[in-house]
Amino acid sequence: MTTGLTWRSAKKLKLWRQSPCKNPMYTGHLEPGVNFFVLALEQYGATTHYSCEGHPAGFYVLFEADYALAMRIQTAGYFSVEIEGENLWSIRTNAADKKRKNYVLTHAAEAWAKHLGPVRRPRTLTKKQTQGHTQ
């Protein structure tokens, strides 16, 4: 069995990211529900750009990665993977109510760990150290 973060344990982390476009509107603390997927994408070699836990619309994460990674994510299931631009993708779910969204995100995280590899807990970084990291 693989070990690593779960969606629920990742929600407890306080993560901060700076947008690649340096726009202050998209820089700051991540919403807890996206933590697992942002960390996973970074560990799998992607660069995350924007994310939303799902209010008022559905959950999404916009990321930059090669085609092969996007297809591996699609194969793991639970999300639609949409083309947003050249090597720019988004994962989305439109699970509307909180109970359904929690179910989908919990199981999606388990599927990613199984098909793409476990997600490690990040080392603790200060806000200044995260200036080079993206979200």
Image (cartoon, grey):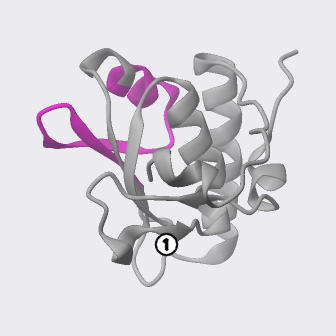
Residue at horizontal 30%, vertical 69%?
23
The residue at the far bottom in this view is 56
- Give percent across and percent down for residue 79: 44, 45
**Vertical placement of 104 versus 69: above or below?**
below
Q: Quadrant of residue 100?
A: bottom right
Identify which residue, 72 or 128, lies in the foreground.
Answer: 128
Q: Quadrant of residue 57?
A: bottom left
Q: Is residue 95 left or right of residue 115?
A: left
Residue at horizontal 44%, vertical 48%?
134
Tag 1 secondary structure: loop
Asked whether residue 72 is drawn in magenta, I would say yes
Residue at horizontal 44%, vertical 53%?
135
**Vertical placement of 66 versus 30: above or below?**
above
Q: Assign the N terminus to one quadrant of the image.
A: top right
Residue position for label 1: 54
The three-letter amino acid code for the residue at tag 1 is: Gly
**Vertical placement of 58 versus 10: above or below?**
below
**Vertical placement of 6 versus 51: above or below?**
above
